[in-house]
Amino acid sequence: MKHFVVNLFKTPMFLIFALITLIYALPALGKQAELSRYAVVTAIGIDNVEEENLENPENKFEVSLLTFIPIAEQTFTETYKVISAQGRSISEAMDLAGLHIGREIGLSHVKSVIMNTDLLKDDVSKFLDYLSRSKNMAASTKLLATDSKAKDFLNAVQKLNSESSIKVSEVINFNTNYIYSSDSSFETFFKGMFGPTKVSLVPFLTINDTEGGISVASGGEQSGGQESSNGGGQNSSTTSGQNEEIVNSGDTLIFKDGKLKTMLTGFDMKKINLVRGDYTTGSIEVKDYTDKIFDHANLIFEIFDKSVQYKVKYENGTPIFYINAQMTLALSEVENGDGMVEKNVEFFVVDQKCINALENKIRRSVADAIGIMRDNQTDIVDFYTFMHNSDKKAFNNFLDSLEDREDYLNRIVFKIGVDILSK
C-alpha cells in the first residue's frame, strides 16, 4: 500500500488532477445552486404599454416572463409563474423583472417569444434586437404573434403547462408538420428578412372561449400564482370565471423587410405550402364529387408522401417557371351529400376520374397561392433564390428589364404539373 501511494505522488498527472480538485472542486461544493441564482424562463411576452394605464409616462413596453419554479416534492410537478414589468425599452423591462423575481434572468431555456400585434405596426426587428443579440438565447426559439395581450396569452400557457402534459411549444413544433401550418424562429425570421426576398413568416395564435382549441380553464387560485409589476412595486392577482382556449388555426403573419405586410389564413397557407412543399402530412379534400359510386360527396385524402420540384427556362428573356408536385394520397373519409360519413372507405377504388379531380384541385390551389403572392408582392416560396442559382446572368437580365424589380412575380409565367399516386 505504501509503495502504491508513493507511485501516485511520483505520477505528474495525479498531481495535476489533485491541484485542479483543490482549486475548483472544493470551492464549488460551497457555492449555492444555480437555480437559486437564476430564474428559468421558458417563454417571453412583449406588449405595448397602454397609455391610460401608465404609471410612468416614459414606459413603452411591458415584458412578461413565464418562469419555472422548482419545488422539491415526492411527486414532481412543474410549477410556473408569470412575472411582468414595464420599462422604456425591452432591456430595461427585463432588468426590472429580474429585480422583482430576485434572480438573474436566464434565457437559455426560452422556447417561445410571443408578441402582441400592436407591436407589429412598426419594424418588428427593433423589438427583437435585444433578444436576438443575447448569447444565451437559442436561434431556434419560436416566434409567435397574438391579438390578445401577450401577458394574457402567457397566463393561458401557464395554466396549460401547469395542469396538462401538453405544452404550447410542443404543439407548435408538432403542428409545423402539417400542410396548413408554418414555422418561425429567430433564425428563420432574420434569415428571411436579410435575404433577397426580405420575407419572413410568424404564426398567429389566439385565445378565446369557443370550442376548437386547447382548453385552458381559469378558475380560482392559479397554480404557482401570478405576479405582475408596472416598473415599481409588485402585486399578485388571479383570474376566475372564464374558460380560455389557445387556438392555432394556421393563420400566419407575413412580414417584408421587418414590417407587417398582410395576414394569411390557414386555408391560404395550405395553398402556399403546396408550392413550398414545407410539410410532411395533412389532408386534401375534393368537394361535391360525383361518379358511379359517389353522389355529391366530399372526399378527404390523407397525404402520405410528397415531392415538389422546380425548373426554370427563359424564352425571349421571360422566365418560364415549372412547378411539378408529386403526391401519394389515400382516401381516408367520405361524407355523403346528406352529411353522413361512410365507413370502410379503404374498400373504395379510386379511379382515374377521381385522380383527375384531385389534380385539378391541387392545380387551382397552387394557382391561388401564386395569385396571393403576386397581389402582395411577397415571394414566400423564395422563387428568387432558385432562379438566381439556376441561371444568374439570365435572371439579372430579366430583373434589369423590369420597371419595378420588386414586382418580378407578375412577370414570371408559371406552369403547374401534378402527379397523384393513390394508395
Image: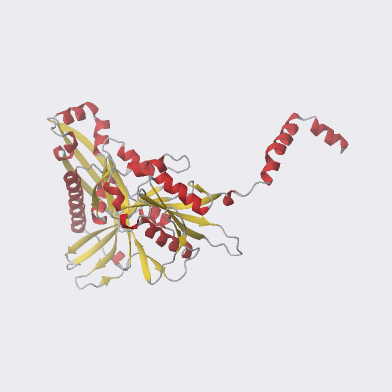
Which of the 4 image quarters holds residue 186? top left
Which of the 4 image quarters holds residue 64? bottom left
Task: Please say whether residue 140 is visible from this viewpoint.
Answer: no
Q: Residue 183 in the image: x percent, y percent?
A: 34, 49
Q: Which of these two is toward me, 310 or 261?
A: 261
Q: Which of these two is toward me, 281 or 15?
A: 15
Which of the 4 image quarters holds residue 214? bottom left
Q: Is residue 118 above or below residue 215?
A: above
Q: Which quarter of the figure is the C terminus placed in?
A: bottom left
Q: Which of these two is toward me, 356 or 254?
A: 254
Instruction: Tell me which residue sits at (75%, 33%) in the image.
Output: 14
Count numbered badges in the picture: 0
Q: Residue 30 in the image: x percent, y percent?
A: 68, 46
Q: Residue 245 in the image: x percent, y percent?
A: 36, 65
Task: Please say whether residue 80 is visible from this viewpoint.
Answer: yes
Q: Residue 270 in the image: x percent, y percent?
A: 26, 53
Instruction: Tell me which residue sits at (80%, 32%) in the image.
Output: 9
Q: Which of these two is toward me, 100 or 289?
A: 100
Q: Is residue 73 above or below residue 276?
A: below
Q: Is residue 20 above or below residue 167?
A: above
Would residue 96 appear left or right of 361 to someone viewing this image? right
Q: Residue furthest top?
A: 393
Instruction: Tell me which residue sits at (22%, 65%) in the image.
Output: 298
Q: Is residue 135 above or below residue 68?
A: above
Q: Which quarter of the figure is the N terminus placed in?
A: top right
In this picture the colour scheme is secondary structure
